[in-house]
Each structure stands twice: as C-alpha cells, then as structure tokens.
Amino acid sequence: MPESTQNAPPAPETAATGQPPATQDLRFSAQSTGQPFEVAVLALQNLTLFPETVVPLGIGRPRSLAAVESALATPEKLLACVTVRPDRSDDTDATSADLYEVGTLTMIKRMERTNEGMRIIVQGTERIRVVEWKQQDPQLRAVVEILPPPRTVDAEQVEATKRNLQQMITEALALLPNVPPEVRIAVLGSAEPTRLSYFLASILNLGVEEEQKMLEANTADELVRLAHTNLAREVEILQLRSKIATEAQTEMDKAQRDYVLRQQMRAIQKELGEDETGEAAETELLRERLDKAELPEEVRAEADRELKRLQRLPAAAPDYHVIRTYLEFILELPWLKSSEDKLDLAEARRILDEDHYGLEDVKERILEFLAVIKLRPDTKSPILLFVGPPGVGKTSLGRSIARSLGRQFERMSLGGVRDEAELRGHRRTYIGAMPGRIIQSIRRAGVNNPVMMLDEVDKLGNDYRGDPAAALLEILDPQQNNSFRDHYLDLPFDLSRIFFIATANQLGPIPPPLRDRMEIIPLAGYSDREKLEIARRYLIPRQTTENGLNTGQLKIADDAVELIAARYTREAGVRQLERTVGSIARKVALKIAQAQAENVTVTAKDLREYLGPPRFYPEQARKELPAGVATGMAWTEMGGEVLFIEATLLPGGRGLTITGQLGEVMQESARAAQSYLWSHAAEFGIEPEIFKEFGVHLHVPAGAIPKDGPSAGVTITSALASLYTGRRVRPDTAMTGEITLSGLVFPIGGVKEKVLAAYRAGIRRIILPSRNEADVDDIPEDVRDDLQIVFVSRIAEVLDAALEVLVANPPPQPPSIVDGGRSRQPEPEPLSVKS
Amino acid sequence: MRDIDKEFSLIRTDRRVIPSGRLWNPAADVYRSDDGWVVKVDLAGVCADELEIEIHDSMLRIRGCRRDKHYRDGFVYHQMEITYSRFEKSIQFPAPIEGASIRHDYTDGFLIINVRREQD
C-alpha cells in the first residue's frame, strides 16, 4: 500500500468557521484530529466492510463480543473492522496476526442481544490502517490511523468508467428479479464513484482477496477500474446463467417430475417390502457374483470396468440399467462351462435308430463324425447341412444327434431373418440393444458346446440392413469363430465348440461361400414303403396317445396307410401323413368316448368314411399316349413328380411355339431337341419336308406352374420324335436326362425322387442317363426290383427305348421304329437339374 | 424510523449491505417569522457546547456530535437504538442570510435558532 502515515489525512476541517467547502461528510470527534488513536478491532471472517455502507453483523466469538462491548462502552461507539486473511484455514477466533492491515472504521448504529450473542448494525465511515497492535485479549485493540478517501487522478476517466458501471448495473438488475427496490434505487441513484464502487464491492461475491484489493485502492481511478472489471465478470456470469436456466427450464421440469415420481415409487416399494437392496447393495451383489463366476481374463477386466462405471451412476440414470443388464448378461453366459460328451457309438446308433426310420446313409455320416470326435476330442465340431424337402425329419435328426452326444440342443429359425443385427446383436449405444440370436441361444443352452440348429438357412433374406448370410460366414468359419464378437457383448466368444447343424429345403439360395463351409447331407423324400414303416412305428402310436387313446384302441391297417400316403397326402415327408392319421384318431376317439366302440381298426375301405373322398389323384401313367406326348419326371421340393410333354403339329405354321411357363433353360433344350431331330431327320426316318411345312407347338401342363431345368431334354426329344415319326412313346416308360446338340445324354439330379414319383404313378420302366447309374443305389430295393431301368448315353438309344414300333400297340420293349409314344409331365415344378 | 428487524430483512440475503446515507440526519422545522426565520432541530442529547453553527451565503449549517454520556462503569448494553454520531445539517434559505444576527437556544431537546434579518 503506497500511502502511509505521513500523507495520511490532512484531517478534515472540523472546527468550521465558514470557509471550508463543506462538500462531503465531515470528520468529527476523536479521530478527527488526524492523529492515530486507539480503538477496539473486530475481526471479520469472509467479509470486507467498506466505508459508506451499512452492514448487519452477527457476533458470537468471545474476542468479537468483547470488542463490541468495549466499543459500546465509548461515547462514540466506534469499532474498527478488519478482515481475516483468506489463507487462514482454521475456524478459531482470529488473532491480530491473521488480519490484514487495512480495514474500515465503523460506528455501531444498533445493537440487539440474541441467543447466540448479539446482532449489530454498523456503518462504515472511513478506511483505517493499523499502526500498532495493542492487545489480543480479551478483545483485539489497535492504534489506527485514518486513511484519506481515494483521490481522483483523472476525473474524466473516473466519470466515464462510472457511467459504464451504472449501465452494467442496469443490465445486471434486469437479470436479477429479486433485488429489493431500496437497493435498486440506492445503486442507481448513487452518483459518487467511490461510494458506488464500495457498494458494488460489498454486494458482489468477489472473495476476500479481491475485496481487500478494492478496499486498499488509494485512487478513485483504480477503485472504479477494479469495480468495473469485477462487475463485468459478474454480469457475464449472470447472463450465462440466465441463458442456461432458460434452456434447461423444460428439461429440469421433466427431470424433477421424474425424480419426484421415482422417490414416490421407492417409498411405495419400501412399504411393500420390495426395496431390500439399495443401489449399493445391488452393485455389491453383482461384484460377488462376478467373483464367483468363471470368466476369462479379458471378460473379467471388462466386467470390472463396467461395474466401476455402474457404481458411480445413480439408479435413476438411464445408463444404469443398460450397464446392469449388460453385466447380468455377461454373468449368465457360459464362458467356460461345457457339457461332457458321451461318446458311445453303439448307444448313438441306437438313439438314431429309435428316433428315425431309414435314412441309413445319413446316420452313417453322423456316426462317422461322432467317431472322429471320440478319437480326437479337440477336433473342431463339424458343420452339417441337411438338405431335403419339408417333413423328412431334418430338425428331429438334429435333436437326435444332440441326444446321442448328450449335448444341449438349441434351435433357431433363420427363415425371414434379414437383418445382420439379429444374428450379431446391436451395439450397446442403441436404446433397447440386445445381443444377437447366436449369443442368446448360447445363454439359453447354458453351455458353450450345444448342438445348434440353424433352421432354414436357405430362407435368409437380405436388404440394406446388411446380409445375415455374410454374418453366418464368420459364425460358421472354424478359423474365425473361436473369437466371435457379438456387437452387444463386444467381447470375443468361442463358438468353435458348438456343433452347428443347418437345414435347408434347397441348396440354390444358399450363397456358395456359405455352402462351402458346410458338410452337405442330402435327405431325399421317403418312399411309400418307408412312409408305411414310419407311420407304423412313430406316427400312429404318437397320434394314438396324443388323442387320448390307449394302445390297442386304434389300429390302422397297412393298406389304409398306403392309401392315405398315396391319395390323401402328397408330400415327400410325413407331416401331412401324420396329420391325417391324427384326424382319424380324433374321429375314433369320438366314437370311443360316445361308447359306440371299444376299439377300432381302420382299413382302406373305411377311409372314405373317416376322411371323405381321396383328395389327390396323382398323375397316373396313361394307358395310351397319342403321338407327340412323352412321360417325363421332375424334381420338386415336395419330392418328385411325373409330367407329360405334349407336342402337336401346326399345318402351315412356322417354328416352335413353347407354352407352359417354361424357363429359359428348358426352352433352350426344346430348341436343341428340335434342331437335333431336324439335322438327323434321315437317321430317324423323318420327312425333312415336315420341318418346313409344319410349325410345332410344345406345351407342358400344368400351365400355371413354372418349370425350368435341362433335365426334360430327352423327354422333349422323345415327344418331338414321336410327333414327327408318328411312332408313339411307350406309355409304361418315363424318362429324364439332359441332351446336347451332338446327341449325347448328360446326367441329371434328384434321381431317387424322380424314380419314386414315376413308380407311384404306376410306371415300371425308366430311362436314365447312364452316368446316373450310381444314383440308382439310393432307390429303395423293393422299388428297384420292381423296375426296369434303361441306361442311355445317346439320343438314338433314348428313342430306341422310348418309341413303340410302328405297327401295333403292345410291342415288347426293345427297339424298333416308327409310331408315336408320348409322355407327359403333370404338375411339374422347377425341374432342377445337376450334372 | 425502521426498527431493527425491518432493517435486517431489507438487506440482501447473502451480504445484507446497503449503502449508507448520512450518518445521522436530524429532523428540522423552519418557521418564517416577522423579522426572519426560526429553525427548530430535533437534537436531543447533543451537548450545546459542542455545536457549530455557521452561515454561508443563503445556507445555514449546523454540525455537532451526539455522544453517549450516560454510560457508566458497570453498565452493560442490552439494546442500542439511538445513533451516537457526528452529524451535519444544512438548511437552504430562499435569500442570502449572511450578516444576519443569530441566536440559539436549546430547550426540551430541540435546538431553536433565530435568524434575524439585517435590516431589522
């Protein structure tokens, strides 16, 4: 502090005589002499008292009380107020060492006793400096000298700053709604810069240091400048606060409402005794469970991290539940828990046989895999793909595999899944995020090595949300799936111990890379004999008990079962067969319940009574085929079909008309067939003129069903050859095979289904490509024995075998020439073909 | 006069500071008389010897100080409401009064000042 004792007050003009300008308040009394004098000192905590302000003070500390008492005992009630330095931390009664040197002389205006001590109102008069401490106890006393009021150096500057101050004060007052009008008037009306600054200093929350700085300012310039700086900062804060307050208003209201409701809910829960565990208890519980759980290191570390976050959050925070759910999910996952395989091959065989009839080669493949697992337990589990028509037992086969291995079985249908996130989960940042289906079924299984069945992989969709098949690529890749990362979990999980089994009705829609990862096991449809066995062993007993009948109360004769399979159902599997058996069982149950019968045996004759007229009249071999018609065979998802290909000449027409919803491949094979016959007309005894004079219309019923594939090649050729030569196709013969323009016959797929369909239709003679000879082994022996199969490798051989000899109707089988036969193909569905 | 509670409540909550006015501003009545002015000031408890009265142009100024003279050793304040303070009271007249003769009297706690015009 610059000014000190010597330039202290040229003490006021007291003994007034008339000349003094008498502008300001005048200093009378003891201190007015300008000499240092002794006075009681009050130590102020966290507060600086300025001249020309009135301040109420609560007095409680012993030294303070003593100082005030002592001041009151003087005629003029003067008391010096000096602020305690802020660095003094403890809260005890301050001593002189703790105080600043510059303070304010005050006059006590009012005093009142209270329970805690007293309340006083003091009025600051002028600044003082402590010259010498006189006494510490019972009260502080010091010799002080009066400091002059801050003098003005640059009056214009001070005035300008002051106006600026007033402007700012107006702004600030607009932001403070609760200012008493007295203060408002006092502040705005205060014209004197020093006075205004002091007042501002005392109402703003500046902190002791800053306040003291203002008190010690010796020039008005500095004082006003400090006031300006501080007020500017204060106004800025006020503006910011009011802006935030406005913005936050709505949000606050909602949050407060939520808070109140939540508190009420908590109170209700407490009343209901549901609030046993608080938040802290909850996290503690989670920690205990984490400690107990077997977790890989990486998982444990992540879980701990999340738990720490959880502890810092209040239960009301939205993240709280997200994290808690996540942690609970981690706890529920079988990270290291696996079931033990029971690898008894004989037992496995028994279980497979018990659950499924037939399917010999499939069972064989499964047993082979089990044997490998037994020899090398750390082998990566195989990924099987069962392909076959509906109802042939793909899913239940999976269940049997799980049973024979002693593993958990989990099945999920992928039909219609079109979002990658369904398999792989959503990131936790999303509201309502969930783990993907893979991880969820592992949690359900409770072990990390279940048999997991992915049903209907051929029905996966895909769109802009991603391609689930691509996600399956990772899941099913033994090289990658030991650290599969679900988006929700965001931790690697080992899928390599899972025994994946996929099923599909068709191979076609499965993307090649996915197909490539799986061991494909085709399941063909069942023959009638197999269906009979399955009905006898599984379906009839099951439906009997399901419909509340006792064993022996319902008997269905074999001929009835055969008739049901042939006339009341049309399928490759046995689902419809089972349903039909079920409806018979219900009708029998009604009879028995009404006591009309004790037990019932259903024979073929009774079926009309139970089921009404037969629903299907499958395409039967026609007794006679006109020239230009040939019998073909088609493969459908439902199994096989026979279909007829019809051709007719159009006199005066041109070219080849093709109808019957044929796909491009099939149309092309029709053209190839015509071209071949045309080019080899002489060889087959065809009038070349006929190609010029007549057009041909080729039709494949039923017209509403799309068909495609090259396997109808030989049938089309036969039909056309029959048309051109007039020799009929033998009605007891069905054929299939792809042709080439050079007259070769190529192999096709689906031999078993096709042959069985033909057999069902009453056909006993089949023409097959010779390269399909191996597939004949798939055909059940009883059927095979009943059939005459002709293998061909050239079109000429086909025609030899297919066409009747020109002369009469019932020729023996071997070749001959002339005369038409035909074949037909009813209700074909896409003719699927492989070569 | 505001009582102490009112004073407390008027002051802003955190700091409860108000700017001060005059330390003490005693009330005064002014009469116009035939030959000048009579000024009556409410100045109980002020020692007349310590008063200073001066005239400057048309301004009458009274200064002084009220001190607590009843306090004795052994007294303890229980309540204090009277302002003991120096004061200054200025009274503006419509015309200059310089040169007027002044006489003052101190009765019943009032200071009575007679200002007699020069002409008289």
Image (tube, rainbow, N blue to C red):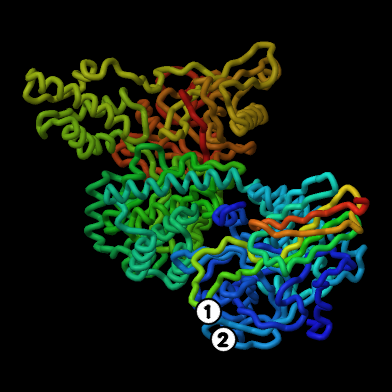
User: Vertical placement of A89 versus B29: above or below?
Assistant: below
Label 2 environment density (alpha carbons within 10 Å; few <14, some 14–19, many ≥20): some
Q: In the image, which disc is placed on residue A543?
A: none
Where residue A196 appears, x then y in whole percent? 77, 61
Q: Position of residue B9 (x, y in %)?
A: 57, 54
The residue under label 2 is which amino acid type?
Answer: Gln
Which residue is drawn at the image coordinates 40% and 39% (left, top)? A752
Q: Quadrant of residue A237?
A: bottom right
Say which of A686 and A546 sits in front. Answer: A546
Residue A533 x %, y %: 23, 38
**Residue A725 visible in the snapshot:** no
Q: CA distance from mark 2 to mark 1?
A: 8 Å
The one nearer the camera, A753 or A414, is A414
Identify whether A558 is placed above or below A309: above
Same chain for the residues at labels 2 and 1, yes or no? yes
> Is A8 placed left or right of A141 in the picture?
right
Q: Secondary structure at mark 2?
A: loop
Question: Which residue extends farthest front?
Answer: B120
Q: Which residue is mark 2?
A: A136
Check if mark 2's residue and mark 1's residue have beta carbons within 8 Å: yes
Tell me what residue is drawn at x 68 percent, y 64 percent.
Answer: A202
Q: Count numbered badges in the picture.
A: 2
Q: Which mark is residue A63?
A: 1
**Disc 1: host chain:** A
Q: SS class of the residue under badge 1? A: helix
